[in-house]
Amino acid sequence: MTEYYVDPEEHPDGECALCGEDWDLVFMYVRHEGRAGRTTITSCRRCETSVGSQRLMDWLRSHCEQKSEKWEEILHYQRGRRTGLAQLIHAVYRAYH
């Protein structure tokens, strides 16, 4: 589970790509594991601020381990989705459960 790719084309601009919030939106840079570069996705300010300069994978793992409220929001929003980001989130979930 070391390589992932978040495709900005898979996520609508009107909501956070992580949790689905549709207000206070900003752009967030996602650094990719195993690949050079980064991608810009739409994010709510709460997710963007929380991720900060961390790699997305590390941030997801910490929220999963802590079973945070934000993690539950993300899981609920990503349920049933087939995007690269959703696959990453489901892989983190399976690794800790």
Image: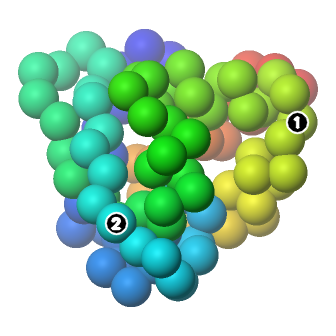
Q: Quadrant of residue 17?
A: bottom left
For the residue pair 11 and 50, the one nearer the viewer reads as 50
| Circle 1 residue | 67
Circles 2 and 1: CB atoms closer than 8 Å: no
**Residues at marks 2 and 1, CA–CA distance in whole angstroms:** 25 Å
Q: Position of residue 11 (x, y in %)?
A: 36, 70
**Relative to residue 69, is residue 96 depicted above or below?**
above
Q: Position of residue 9 (x, y in %)?
A: 22, 67
User: At label 1, which amino acid type do we have?
Assistant: Lys
Q: Position of residue 58 (x, y in %)?
A: 54, 20
Q: Nearer the viewer, mark 2 or mark 1?
A: 2
> Neighbour class for label 2 at 10 Å: few (<14), some, many (≥20)?
some
Residue at image point 38% right, 27% down: 53
Q: Is residue 30 left or right of residue 67?
A: left
Q: Quadrant of residue 78?
A: bottom right
Q: Which mark is residue 41?
A: none
User: At label 2, which amino acid type do we have?
Assistant: Val
Q: Is residue 70 visible?
A: yes
| Circle 2 residue | 26
Q: Is residue 41 left or right of residue 47?
A: left
> Neighbour class for label 1 at 10 Å: few (<14), some, many (≥20)?
few
Q: Residue furthest left?
A: 36
Q: Position of residue 95 (x, y in %)?
A: 74, 20
